[in-house]
Amino acid sequence: MKKSKNLMFAFFASIFLLASCNNSKVVADNEKLMRGDWTVTNVSVDGINQSYVDITVFDEAKTKCYVGSAWHLVQNNATGNYTVNAGGDCPSGTTKIKWFITEESGQYYFNFKKIYEGERPKNVVDGYKMRVSSNTGSTIVLVQDLMFEGKPISVNYTFQKNS
């Protein structure tokens, strides 16, 4: 009886290990596809009439300011930056980030946190999370789920890889 319990435990432990390894591989593959230089070609909002609202995202700028923004993502150390193009009421500047992919219940998320001069990424606890809607390696669609005036909305960012 004890031998069969040990065999059962070993069987379930190996299935868990295999599943977690496969999951880690999918996360790593997603991160590999995301590395490089990207341009946001479109930002749209679902769940509210976009013409009536101008939403500030990433605690920094209005959604329209991110169209044309340049994102540089380095995979091997999960660092990068993005640059918002100045103009009108859009701020200018480059923001350093630390990014990573996570998996929750079969859904993958692009997470990043802003890193300011003199800060260590491990000491930054606040960040942003966007659902990976699609990732072909040349186009990425990330969806940021937010609450606006008590209602759920989704901000959709379409990234095009630079050649």
Image: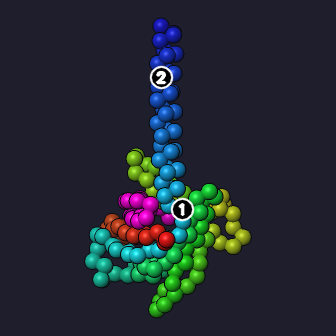
- CA–CA distance in space, label 1 to label 2: 37 Å
Between 118 and 110, the residue placed more toward the observer is 110
Q: Is residue 36 above or below residue 20?
A: below
Is residue 149 something that shows in the picture?
no
In the structure shown, which secondary structural element does the residue marked by tag 2 occupy? Answer: helix
Nearer mark to the viewer, of 1 and 2: 1
In the structure shown, which secondary structural element does the residue marked by tag 1 occupy? Answer: loop
Q: Where residue 152 sits: x, y (%)?
A: 33, 65
Q: Where residue 84 sits: x, y (%)?
A: 52, 80
Could you say which disc has been placed on residue 35 in the image? 1
Q: Main secondary structure of the magenta part?
A: strand
Q: Earlier in the sequence, mark 1 or mark 2?
A: 2
- Quadrant of the image occupied by residue 42: bottom left
The colouring scheme, among rainbow, by chain, secondary structure or one colour, is rainbow
Direction top: furthest residue: 1
Q: Is residue 27 above or below residue 48?
A: above
Q: Where residue 101 sits: x, y (%)?
A: 51, 55
At a point 33% along the width and 68% down the height, the residue shown is 153
Q: Dot 1: within a 10 Å radius of its alpha carbon, few (fewer than 14), some, or many (20 or more) residues?
A: some
Between 53 and 102, the residue placed more toward the observer is 102
Q: Dot 2: within a 10 Å radius of its alpha carbon, few (fewer than 14), some, or many (20 or more) residues?
A: few
* Residue 136 in magenta stretch: yes
At a point 51% along the width and 76% down the height, the residue shown is 70
Residue that mark 2 sits on = 11
| Stretch of the chain drawn in magenta | 127-146
Between 34 and 46, the residue placed more toward the observer is 34
The amino acid sitting under disc 1 is: Arg
Q: Is residue 27 left or right of residue 150?
A: right
Q: Where residue 71 sits: x, y (%)?
A: 53, 72
At a point 38% along the width and 59% down the height, the residue shown is 134
